[in-house]
Image (spheres, grey):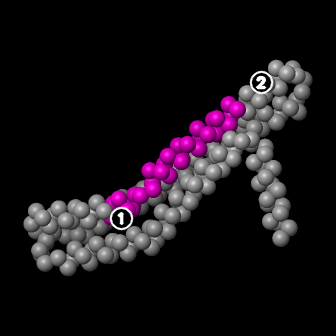
């Protein structure tokens, strides 16, 4: 139980070190990861079930060569594509937002440094160090969040495209 208290204190100290922008970055990264985990869970369970249902529905059709059948097939593939890519654009938005928020943290930290320099001159190194840490910590956090998100959103996008293509190939028009 002591490790939990130590972990909480370390996170709290880190968040205080980065200033208010770091809290915003933390919320952004948390939301991004919630969406990533949701997509992973969907890919492991719901997408397979949905693809199976679509294939069964298509195979049970008595006729698959008419224009009407082709339109129904395209509708099924489109529905599957929308379900598999749902939320990925929001994840991409969060990935793009992370470095921008990190830059905002850099700017606000540097403003704090300049305020200290204006009030007390360049002699108060301790006060300037707080502003420098408030400038660098959010930048680092924004970059770490963006890098982790870029990797996973690329994997998720490719997987979704692959599954849609596989479904499209498996719904044959002959009969």
Q: Position of residue 115 (x, y in %)?
A: 79, 25
Residue 103 located within the stretch drawn in magenta: yes
Q: Is residue 58 left or right of residue 97?
A: left
Q: Is residue 37 left or right of residue 50?
A: right
Q: Position of residue 91 (x, y in %)?
A: 50, 52
Please report the residue visible at 9 percent of the width from the left and 66 percent of the height from the top: 66
Main secondary structure type of the part rendered in magenta: helix
Please report the residue visible at 56 percent of the width from the left and 54 percent of the height from the top: 32
Please report the residue visible at 69 percent of the width from the left and 47 percent of the height from the top: 23
Look at mark 1 in the image and give the residue it sits on.
163
Q: Tell me: residue 123, above or below residue 56.
A: above
Which corner quadrant holds the C terminus? Answer: bottom left
Please report the residue visible at 45 percent of the width from the left and 56 percent of the height from the top: 87
At numbered mark 1, what does the secondary structure look like: helix, strand or loop? helix
Q: Residue 109 falls in which quadrant of the image?
A: top right
* Residue 125 visible to the viewer: yes
* Residue 162 visible to the viewer: no
Closer to us: 14 or 119: 119
At numbered mark 2, what does the secondary structure look like: helix, strand or loop? helix
Q: Tell me: residue 117, above or below residue 61.
A: above
Closer to us: 133 or 9: 9
Q: Residue 143 falls in which quadrant of the image?
A: top right
Q: Is residue 124 left or right of residue 31?
A: right
Mark 1 or mark 2: name the one nearer the start of the chain: 2
How many discs mark residues in the rendered view? 2
Q: Which residues are magenta?
A: 80-108
Residue 14 located within the stretch drawn in magenta: no
Look at mark 2 in the image and give the residue it sits on.
114
Which corner quadrant holds the N terminus? Answer: bottom right
Closer to us: 30 or 122: 30
The residues bearing labels 1 and 2 have C-alpha atoms spaced at a distance of 53 Å
């Amino acid at each position: 139980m002591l490790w939990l208290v130590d972990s909480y204190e370390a996170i709290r100290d880190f968040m205080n070190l980065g200033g208010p922008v770091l809290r915003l970055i933390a919320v952004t990264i948390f939301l991004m990861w919630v969406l990533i985990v949701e997509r992973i869970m969907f890919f492991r369970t719901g997408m397979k079930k949905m693809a199976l249902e679509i294939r069964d529905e298509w195979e049970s059709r008595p006729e698959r060569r008419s224009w009407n059948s082709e339109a129904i097939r395209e509708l099924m593939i489109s529905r599957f594509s929308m379900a598999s890519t749902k939320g990925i654009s929001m994840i991409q938005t969060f990935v793009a937002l992370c470095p921008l928020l990190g830059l905002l943290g850099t700017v606000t930290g540097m403003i704090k440094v300049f305020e200290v320099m204006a009030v007390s001159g360049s002699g108060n190194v301790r006060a300037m160090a707080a502003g420098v840490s408030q400038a660098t910590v959010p930048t680092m956090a924004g970059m770490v969040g963006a890098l982790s998100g870029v990797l996973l959103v690329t994997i998720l996008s490719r997987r979704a495209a692959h599954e849609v293509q596989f479904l499209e190939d498996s719904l044959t028009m002959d009969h």
